[in-house]
Amino acid sequence: MTQDELKALVGHAALKYVVPGEIVGVGTGSTVNKFIDALASMKDQIKGAVSSSEASTVRLKALGIPVLDSNEVESLSVYIDGADEIDHQGHMVKGGGAALTREKIVAAQSKQFVCIADESKLVQALGAFPLPVEVIPMATARVMRQFAAMGGSAVVRMQDGQPLVTDNGQYIVDVKGLKITDPVAFESEVSQWPGVVTVGVFAHQKAQVCLLGTSEGVKTLNF
């Protein structure tokens, strides 16, 4: 199966975690787009969605799925999102789609995080995928120097020759060369650096379930 077919497979498999009559948390990215397309088949059974990005909001609304402001919703039964990497404990690296801050917010108000990914995303240790970190622009150079002191190599993510600006009006730095052996401690430390809005390690908001697309079908991992 192609990677695109694997994404469609896990996107559809995630429907069984959606609770009828409730509001679903929806992530961002190419795999989530497959889930959103599948969610349209049961849109009349849910109250709506809380979205983690403008891009997902546009896609949800285009399919007739109501999108609610996260401030209007006390809690969500489930949050369904992809990952750039996921380890065997459910810790993830996220932010390839530049939506990590809103993703972490929606994950924090959800009772269960279901990660949907193809098997290439499952790793022994986080760090091979460049780590996205959302930063306030004036802190960019200093944050990059702090990662250099850790042995990482950071660059500002660019778009059309300019720094990419997130939905929150901030920049993204992508960090290579890190091996994150203690994701909880790493997330806690970097989150305290002045100017860091969100680090793309999801250890405190880790996945409880991962639906992994494989050539043999969907493999369910529980953490």
Image: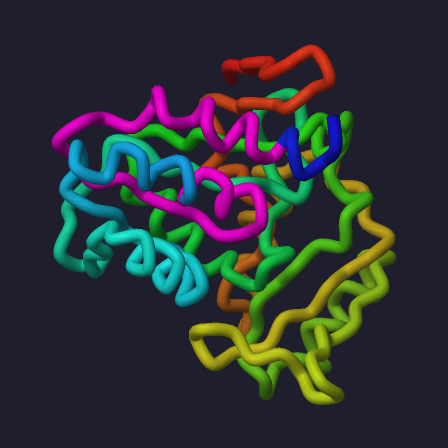
Q: Does the magenta stretch include residue 13?
A: yes
Q: In this view, does 215 lie to the left or right of 64?
A: right
Which corner quadrant of the image does residue 172 belong to?
bottom right
Q: How many marks?
A: 0
In front here: 64 or 107? Answer: 64
Whole-percent x and y of residue 200?
Answer: 59, 53
Q: In this view, does 160 lie to the left or right of 76?
A: right
Q: Determine the residue positioned at 56% across, 26% down.
A: 9
Q: Determine the residue positioned at 67% across, 83% down.
A: 163
Whole-percent x and y of residue 180?
Answer: 74, 41
Q: Is residue 16 above or below residue 198?
A: above
Whole-percent x and y of residue 151?
Answer: 87, 57
| SS majority, magenta | helix
Q: Determine the residue positioned at 54% across, 14% down.
A: 220
Q: Determine the residue positioned at 50% across, 60% down.
A: 99
Which corner quadrant of the image does residue 126 belong to?
top right
Q: In this view, does 214 lie to the left or right of 148?
A: left
Q: In this view, does 66 lie above or below 46?
A: below
Which corner quadrant of the image does residue 120 belong to?
top right
Whole-percent x and y of residue 115?
Answer: 51, 32
**Quadrant (top left, top right, bottom left, bottom right) of the N terminus:** top right
Q: Does the magenta stretch include residue 164?
A: no
Q: In this view, does 80 lie to the left or right of 121?
A: left
> How was the colour assigned to the protein in this rendering?
rainbow
Q: What stretch is highlighted in magenta?
A: 7-36
